[in-house]
Image (cartoon, grey):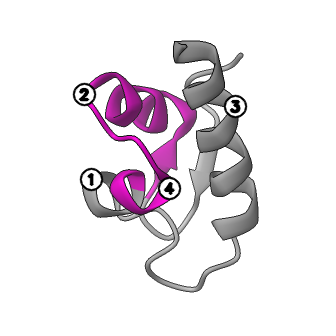
Amino acid sequence: MNLNKVVCSCYKVTKGDVLKAVENGASSFKDVKKETKLGKACGKCKKKGKKLTKKLLSEQK
């Protein structure tokens, strides 16, 4: 996985940022959104962000 790939272009949130949020205890997309601002502006990245968050959370278990 390319951790430098931008998921949210409005806030320049990368896959690495989402991973870091999950590693820091985010247990849902809402938590990731709160920590990274992913999906807070235009919303185009929400679907991709939710999918990535779900994938990362499942890998944590």
Q: Secondary structure at mark 3?
A: helix
Q: Are marks 4 and 3 in contact (CB under 8 Å)?
A: no
Q: Which residue is mark 1?
A: 35
Q: Which residue is mark 2?
A: 24
Q: Is residue 20 left or right of residue 57?
A: left
Q: How far apart, in angstroms, are the residues tagged by discs 4 and 2?
A: 13 Å
Mark closest to the chain's N terminus, 3 or 1: 1
Q: Is residue 30 magenta?
A: yes
**Location of residue 7 in the rendering, given as x and y in whole percent from the top left corner:** 62, 50
23 up-or-down from 22: above or below: above
Tell me the number on the disc at residue 51.
none
**Location of residue 11 in the rendering, given as x and y in whole percent from the top left corner:** 42, 64
Q: Secondary structure at mark 2?
A: loop
Q: Which of the two marks, 3 or 1, is nearer to us in this view?
A: 3
Q: Is residue 24 left or right of residue 16?
A: left
Range of the magenta residues? 12-32
60 up-or-down from 21: above or below: above
Q: Residue furthest bottom?
A: 42
Q: Mark 4, residues whose alpha carbon is within 10 Å: few (<14), some, or many (≥20)?
A: many
Q: How far apart, in angstroms, are the residues tagged by discs 4 and 1?
A: 10 Å
Q: Are marks 3 and 2 in contact (CB under 8 Å)?
A: no
